Image (spheres, rainbow, N blue to C red):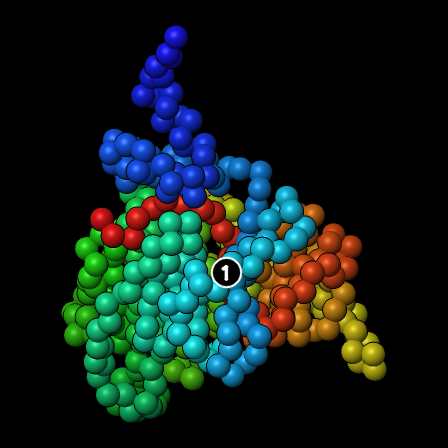
Amino acid sequence: MAVTLSEDLVEDILERLPAKSLVRFKSVARSWNALFRTNSFIRRHSQRQKKGSDERLMIVHADRIIMPTPIITLLSSHHPTLFHLPATQYSFLPQFDLYYVYFYHCSGVVCFCIGSKIVLWNPATREVKDVPTREVTLPESPVNYRQSYRGFGDDRDTFNDFKLIEFNVTFTGDSNNDLFPLVFAEVYSTSTNSWTVLRDVNANDLTPINKLPHFSYTDFYFLDRVYGNGVFYWLSSHYTYILCFDFGSNQFRILDTPTTLPSTIFEAGDSIGFAVKYSVSENWEENQFQIGFEIWILKQDGSWTKIYKYNVKQSFYTAAKMYAIWKDGAEILAGYPGMELVSYNSDGEPLLQFQLLIDMHKYVESIAPLSL
């Protein structure tokens, strides 16, 4: 006797399946193919994936500094062995200089920025999308200063509109002592496959980004960046504030840091973490150092709470940046861009090491399309 399942029960079963299975099942029925592209299903499937017990990291590293071959590795909290993605899956990546590539991740979609080339990639569906380029002309600056910053994320209300924010800063004025920043900001959306200007440098209105605290053009820059729950964050060079961009409202805002000590920011679940680094002990003759990290987590109300302290045993340089809290706090990952990434246990002993780290992000599979 044939049993017919209700549509709600079928959807509930499908939501629990991995993204790669859903990709294969698109051809089972037109109704399933249509279902897998709806905002509601993508949202529910993504939320189930994030709540799963298996944490995964995507690590991009290389075999050398000059014109390296990129190596993309997945690390699972359930399996101690590394899984290297076949190079054929990301053969679209051009050769690049290690110091001129930026890697972002949001809801299963990866964004590579290699010079002026920007590529979006969903490893689960193997969809690749080139982001259209455009020219940005800024006014002349008496100090010849210009900085460009990018961030990648999604609109939490839709779950299938991925966005790339880019803002360019230049300084202008009559003299070095009377300079102020001009900001050109625009955002790209996969739903329209186009760029929208958020703020032109000639606009008369002052947006929050034009009120950024700064000291002079020589130290107006951001040290670190991270995405979390619909918002992208950039840490200021003075550790005094974090610039935030909300992908839902397309608005900038300023967030105070919990301390102005040297620090980095990193992914922490649906929020972000703030890691203050300090020296515990130094042995220069044997090149051994013990570095401490004091971890703060951003709460939903915008305040910070201190949760962990870790001491790691390594050279100073290999523990320069905190990347992630791993396995419910049992391990952390720290390293230095362009050198290496190391995982440490709760006693600070190194476990795994990846040479020539480019970047690392927590990874969750998704069926989100890059073209609507």
345 sits to left or right of 36: right
Name the spot of residue 249 as percent of width and height, x first.
27, 51
Name the one closer to the observer, 221 or 47: 47
Mark 1 belongs to which amino acid? Pro
Please identify the quadrant where the N terminus is shown: top left
Residue at image x 30%, y 57%?
163
Q: Badge 1, how many Cα within 10 Å: few under 14, some, many 20+?
A: few
Q: Is residue 150 above or below residue 325?
A: below
Mark 1 lies on a secondary structure that is: loop
Q: Is residue 21 visible?
A: yes
Identify the residue at horizontal 73%, vertical 73% (top origin).
315
Image location of residue 311, percent across then percent down: 73, 60
Q: Is residue 63 left or right of residue 50?
A: right
Check the image and name the residue furthest to the top. 1
Residue 7: x, y in percent?
31, 21
45 left or right of 315?
left
Is 161 placed above or below 352 here? above
Q: Does the image show residue 238?
A: no
Q: Residue 221 at what x, y percent from top left?
A: 42, 75
Front in this rendered view, residue 316 or 199? 316
Q: Is residue 203 left or right of residue 186?
A: left
Q: Residue at x 40, y 81 (%)?
A: 216
Residue lying at 25% horizontally and 31% vertically, measured from the top left: 31
Rendered position, 311 above or below 78: below
From this view, report whether residue 228 is shown above or below residue 151.
above
- Residue 218, picture quadrant: bottom left
Q: Which residue is mark 1?
A: 86
